[in-house]
Amino acid sequence: MSAPAFTIQVFGTKKCAETRKAERFFRERGQAIHAVDLAQKGMSAGELRNVAARVGGFEALIDRAGARYLAKGLKYAAPTGSRIEQILVADPLLLRTPIVRAGARATVGYAPETWAAWLAELGPGAAR
């Protein structure tokens, strides 16, 4: 029995260079992706918790160096724990991008080595 194929989801924004690089990475390898523009649609609370559990928690998801984080005055509020989850659900543009999901796997940021390993698990001709 062959391994089940998984859908690659790339969460980011059209303006994000790292997100565009992630999309290009998969397209160059013939892997179809489902791109989600966070400016149009954020992640649900459940999706967010699922990704956080795979990447080391909510702290890994919030973009503390981003202009939006600074503009909202969050540098001084320094949210932690469950407050980060609430903030990210309310404003998905505060997420570090790209967030790439494939089945039960997830990464934050540009991670081509990890993605190449995921695609290798699919085997030749399995990319969809």
Image: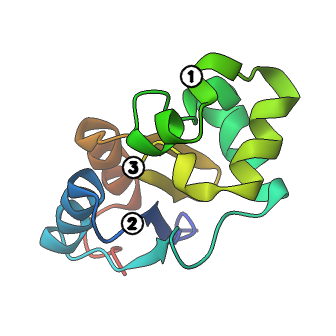
Give the x, y percent position of residue 31.
29, 74
User: How dense is the environment of label 1, judged by Cα within 10 Å: few (below 14), some, or many (20 and up)?
Assistant: few
Between circles 3 and 1, the one closer to the viewer is 1
Q: Amino acid at mark 3?
A: Trp
User: Quarter of the image containing the N terminus?
Assistant: bottom right
- Picture residue at 27% right of the left edge, 76% below the top: 125
Q: Which mark is residue 13?
A: 2
Q: CA distance from mark 3 to mark 1?
A: 35 Å
Give the x, y percent position of residue 22.
26, 57
Give the x, y percent position of residue 28.
12, 70
Q: Amino acid at mark 2?
A: Thr
- Picture residue at 41% right of the left edge, 48% below the top: 97
Do the residues bearing badges 2 and 1 touch, measured as CB atoms within 8 Å? no
Between circles 3 and 2, the one closer to the viewer is 2
Between circles 2 and 1, the one closer to the viewer is 1
Against 119, is 73 above or below? Answer: above
In the rendered structure, which disc, 2 or 1, sits on the residue that comes first in sequence?
2
Instruction: Give the residue at mark 3.
Output: 118
Callout 2: SS:
loop
